[in-house]
Image (cartoon, grey):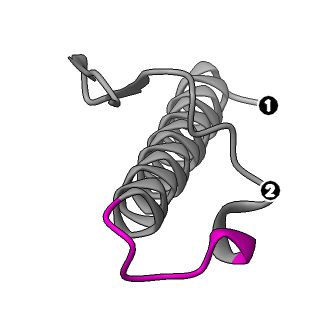
Amino acid sequence: MRYGNIVLGSAVAMALVAIWSMAGEMDYQDAKLEEQHTCAMVRDGIWPAEQAENYNCAEPVQVAGVEHERN
């Protein structure tokens, strides 16, 4: 096996890991935004409390490096 093939294979593997990591981070951020939105809608009385039964609306949520306080 040539050295170039090893380098190319390693670069492809690192690129795939980077893509999967970015996709995982975006999925996590989307879930946190959904939680924040759901808690705000329940807190404002627009949605029933059952909508947020799987969320901990008492804790502050950090989305994209910015902390939002919940009242």
Q: In this view, does 53 lie to the left or right of 40?
A: right
| Residue 54 tag number | 2
Instruction: From the top left corner, tell me how far across and down residue 37 is, in percent.
Output: 36, 62
45 sits to left or right of 54: left
Q: Which residue is drawn at 68% across and 37% down?
A: 56
Q: Within the image, what quadrant is residue 2 found in?
A: top right
Q: In which quarter of the image is the C terminus?
A: top left
Q: In which quadrant is the N terminus drawn?
A: top right
From the viewer's perspective, is residue 65 above or below residue 71?
above
Question: Is residue 67 or residue 42 the one in the foreground?
Answer: 42
Q: What element carries label 1?
A: loop
* Residue pictured at 48% horizontal, 82% vertical: 47
The picture places residue 44, in percent across and down from the top left corner, at: 31, 64
Q: Position of residue 62 (x, y in %)?
A: 37, 23
Residue hosting label 1: 1
Q: For mark 1, does the 10 Å Cα neighbourhood hold few (<14), some (14 to 19), or many (20 or more) residues?
A: few
Q: What stretch is highlighted in magenta?
A: 44-50
Q: Name the residue type under label 2.
A: Asn
